[in-house]
Image (cartoon, rainbow, N blue to C red):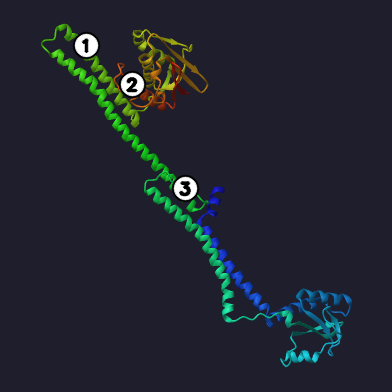
């Protein structure tokens, strides 16, 4: 809620409304102040000031004593005027301190009021009651103190236009900053359209322009990611075609050659049996490769769903160990269990998880140093089950450890290794583990290679 309020107050609409309100206030207050200043310098303005002074004096001055005279003096000082209370003959009863003498020339004042006389003063006469008798209150001010302001029409026009000009300058200053920022955003758009997706527009403020800059930066980042993803997909397609064509062609070429030898009349029966056995082996290898390709394709496209149920992970693991026992013995390798648990229940797809164990154990047998042991461990915690496979490998087989789970990865770049395999086993295993919301990773230290598999409960 707080963020919405801040966002609303930071919007361009609010800013423009505030700018217009401030400009209008500058114009209205400015013109009002100028008119008031000019009016105060006129006779009418001073008469109005005299009237205000009379109201204050008439409210409390009603006796001919020191306190009333003190109050009269304070009011005269407040309004910057001369104040005198006199009788009909001009004899002064009360006066402000800036008035000299004891008698006013009443006749001259009346002539001034009738515009028959000028002495450089502005006068105003009021009736006032002092000690129950009607007297006169004279309030006046000299011209040299008034400093009346007179302007020509052109001067007055310029003065009145000054608040408008000030408001326009303020509006120009505020809008020019936004226009400048809009130009920066436009320059960023040009950079993006020219393919420079690493360019970034500086975000300024929390208004719509700031969010536009942020959105354009985010758009450029996503475009860059999509382009890189598309480039990676194109590379994958090229790699797929190259690797599949190579991996299919090799056993297929051998298969055709052996079948031709079997069909040759000059081939002995003993050799025919031998070539037939080799052909069958090549056919199985070809079939395994096609199955791996098909399974990996389905995993990548999301075409495989898990059939989860409660299962004993230890049983699945030991079944895989049993299946690889013969292959390990051929290489004089032993599969050693380092765990003691006999029952660990998890909600998994038994066949898919068994495929993972089979792939990991098969790789350990194929790529481990002949005559060494393969260690299998299982550790259960309250949150997960971690299974590890450890064996010794040659140093040159550990150069690209981080790429182990990439599709078609083989430590032998030429793909001519005598060790059979599609290069998809670990990629398939990774997909299956991730479908289980688990983790799989590898570690290498000296000649010891470890691969870990973690499934959460």
Residue 261 at least partly seen: yes
Q: Earlier in the sequence, mark 1 or mark 2?
A: 1
Camera-nearest residue between 55 and 105: 105
Q: Is residue 313 above or below residue 91?
A: above
- The reply to whether callout 3 and callout 1 are in contact (CB within 8 Å) is no
Q: Is residue 89 above or below residue 380?
A: below
Percent position of residue 291, x then y = 29, 22
Q: Earlier in the sequence, mark 3 or mark 1?
A: 3
- The answer to which image quadrant residue 372 occupies is top left
Percent position of residue 280, x then y = 22, 14
Q: Earlier in the sequence, mark 3 or mark 2?
A: 3
Q: CA distance from mark 3 to mark 1?
A: 66 Å
| Furthest residue toward bottom | 116
Helix, strand, or loop for circle 2? loop
Mark 3, residues whose alpha carbon is within 10 Å: few (<14), some, or many (≥20)? Answer: some
| Furthest residue toward left | 265
| Furthest residue toward top | 270
Helix, strand, or loop for circle 3? helix
| Furthest residue toward front | 396
Residue 1 at least partly seen: no
Name the residue beneath numbered marker 1: 277
For the residues carrying marks 3 and 2, which lies nearer the camera in this image?
2
Name the residue beneath numbered marker 3: 214
Task: Give the residue displayed 21% in from the left and 18% down from the top.
Answer: 254
Name the residue beneath numbered marker 2: 412
Percent position of residue 196, x then y = 39, 45
- The answer to which image quadrant residue 367 occupies is top left
């Amino acid at each position: 809620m707080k963020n919405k309020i801040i966002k609303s107050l930071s919007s361009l609409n609010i800013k423009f409304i505030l700018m217009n309100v401030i400009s209008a206030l500058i114009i209205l207050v400015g013109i009002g102040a100028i008119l008031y200043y000019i009016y105060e310098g006129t006779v009418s303005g001073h008469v109005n000031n005299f009237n205000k002074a009379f109201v204050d004096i008439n409210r409390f001055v009603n006796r001919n004593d020191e306190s009333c005279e003190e109050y009269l003096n304070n009011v005269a000082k407040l309004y910057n005027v001369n104040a005198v209370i006199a009788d009909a003959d001009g004899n002064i009863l009360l006066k402000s301190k800036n008035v000299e003498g004891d008698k006013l020339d009443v006749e001259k004042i009346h002539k001034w009021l009738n515009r028959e006389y000028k002495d450089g003063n502005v006068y105003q006469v009021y009736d006032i009651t002092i000690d129950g008798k009607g007297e006169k209150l004279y309030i006046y001010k000299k011209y040299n103190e008034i400093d009346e302001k007179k302007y020509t029409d052109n001067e007055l026009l310029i003065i009145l236009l000054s608040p408008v000009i000030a408001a326009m300058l303020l509006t120009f200053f505020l809008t020019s900053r936004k226009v400048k920022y809009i130009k920066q955003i436009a320059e960023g758009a040009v950079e993006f359209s020219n393919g420079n997706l690493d360019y970034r527009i500086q975000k300024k403020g929390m208004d719509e322009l700031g969010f536009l800059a942020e959105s354009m930066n985010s758009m450029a980042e996503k475009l860059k990611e999509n382009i890189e993803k598309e480039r990676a997909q194109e590379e994958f397609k090229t790699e797929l075609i190259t690797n599949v064509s190579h991996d299919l062609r090799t056993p297929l070429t051998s298969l055709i050659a052996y079948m031709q030898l079997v069909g040759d009349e000059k081939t002995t029966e003993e050799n025919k049996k031998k070539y037939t056995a080799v052909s069958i082996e090549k056919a199985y290898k070809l079939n395994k490769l096609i199955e791996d390709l098909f399974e990996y394709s389905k995993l990548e496209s999301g075409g495989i769903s898990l059939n989860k149920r409660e299962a004993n992970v230890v049983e699945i693991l030991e079944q895989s160990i049993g299946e690889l026992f013969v292959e390990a013995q051929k290489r004089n390798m032993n599969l050693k269990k380092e765990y003691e648990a006999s029952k660990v229940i998890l909600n998994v797809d038994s066949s898919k998880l068994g495929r993972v164990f089979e792939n990991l154990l098969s790789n350990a047998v194929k790529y481990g140093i002949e005559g060494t042991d393969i260690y299998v461990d299982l550790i259960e915690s309250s949150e997960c089950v971690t299974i590890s496979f450890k064996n010794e490998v040659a140093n040159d087989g550990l150069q690209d450890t981080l790429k182990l789970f990439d599709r078609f990865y083989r430590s032998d770049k030429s793909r001519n290794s005598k060790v059979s395999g599609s290069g998809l086993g670990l990629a398939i295993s990774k997909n299956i583990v991730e479908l289980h919301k688990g983790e799989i990773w590898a570690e290498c230290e000296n000649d010891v290679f470890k691969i870990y598999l973690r499934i959460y409960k």
